[in-house]
Amino acid sequence: MKAVQVTGYGDVDQLKLVDIPTPEPKENEVLVQVKACAINNTEIWMREGAYGQGGKSGWRPEGVQFPRTPGSDITGKVVQVGEQVDETMMGKDVVLFPFTSSGPDGQEHISEDMSFIGSEYDGGYAEYVVWPAELCFDMPLEDYTESCVFSVSGMTAWHMVEQVQPKPGETVMVTGANGGVGSLNIQIASKVFGADVIALVGDLSMEERMKELGATHVLSYKSENLEEEILEANGGPIDTVLDVVGDALFSTALTVLKKGGKFCTSGSSGGQKTELDFRTLYLKHITMYGSVLGTREEFKRMLKAISEKKIQPVIDRTFPLEEAREAQQYFKESGKKGKIVLLP
């Protein structure tokens, strides 16, 4: 089969298109013909060593073993089943839950042995992938490309919103609102939980699209008066911030939060380190949440909401598998409108 492998830490030249044997499913696994694989920050940071270069990149302490086939947002068709897998799995269109873990229900995502497809296991930048049958779920939509964009960013967004539990009438500010996680944060907070949403984007030409997704107000993070505009739009301080940007908007977020407000982060595309005056934190009684991925039950609830059309796929463009380098480079550009998808 054709696959794209990461051969070591570095730039996109570390991505190599190769011909390798098609994997064989173990007794509890299935072989999935990959139909679509969306791109995430996690595989780019894995390649760049952003999680800790020098043998510590990836999700496990021992680090990523190269070469590795990346890709974790995967949909496809089951074409072979292991000996202990029910034959009814054959031919099913599935979406893959993206990690294994021995953690108990509700704590899978914080287990020490959590291992990620595309990082600890070979992933979806390939024509075929093997995965445990119990971690393959029915696709929520009929289209492979539309269904693949939710696994990692969708579960991340869903878990973020479930942690902060916004209520109808409360206001949630979403940073990076045009990205994969941000565009889903808008939809989940507004259409599933009933909150008002202030979406922050760079280009206000996206305003109409953001409002279609459920945003009440759309503001540009480039504004010199951003804090004032947020407070004016909301008629005062906001209840919650869902952040994927990090340093660039951290000070603004803490300033506009009300006393007793909540700040939830799952990314740092605008800077991984920041300055914090602890007085702001304790004098305003702010609760902070770190958030990565989520649980199987949250994944199921998300898939149900998708199948009920409460959450829409937001796709910027697709690339053929052979153009994985170009796709990752494009992913890092600003101003995208949703997910980037590879099509084997």
Image: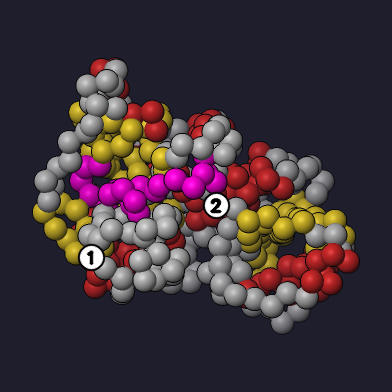
| Location of residue 39 in the rendering, given as x and y in whole percent from the top left corner | 38, 56
Q: Quadrant of residue 270?
A: bottom right
For numbered disc 2, what is the local secondary structure?
A: loop
Amino acid type, label 2: Val
Judge whether residue 42 is colored magenta: no
Asked whether, in this view, residue 19 is left or right of residue 158, the answer is left
Q: Is residue 91 among what the camera can see?
A: no
Q: Circle 2 is placed at which residue position?
A: 292
Q: At 54% from the left edge and 33% from the top edge, which residue is drawn?
A: 104
Q: At 31% from the left edge and 74% from the top edge, which residue is drawn?
A: 10
Asked whether, in this view, residue 226 is left or right of residue 36, the answer is right
Q: Main secondary structure of the magenta part?
A: loop
Q: Is residue 38 above or below residue 336?
A: above
Does the residue at mark 1 contact the one at mark 2 (Cβ under 8 Å)? no
Indicate which disc, 1 or 2, sits on the residue closer to the N terminus. 1
Q: Quadrant of residue 135?
A: top left
Q: Report the magenta residues as a range.
A: 108-129
Q: At 36% from the left edge and 60% from the top edge, which residue is drawn?
A: 63
Q: Looking at this view, is 263 or 8 the one in front?
A: 8
Q: At 34% from the left edge and 51% from the top edge, which residue is drawn?
A: 120
Q: Which mark is residue 96?
A: none
| Location of residue 249 in the rendering, given as x and y in whole percent from the top left corner | 66, 72
Real-space Cα separation, disc 1 to disc 2, in angstroms: 26 Å
Judge whether residue 116 is colored magenta: yes
Q: Is residue 195 above or below residue 13?
A: above
| Location of residue 176 in the rendering, given as x and y in whole percent from the top left corner | 58, 64
Amino acid type, label 1: Thr
Figure coloring:
secondary structure
Q: Is residue 32 among what the camera can see?
A: yes
Crowdedness near tag 1: few (<14), some (14–19) or many (≥20) residues, C-alpha within 10 Å = some
Q: Circle 1 is placed at which residue position?
A: 7
For numbered disc 1, what is the local secondary structure?
A: loop
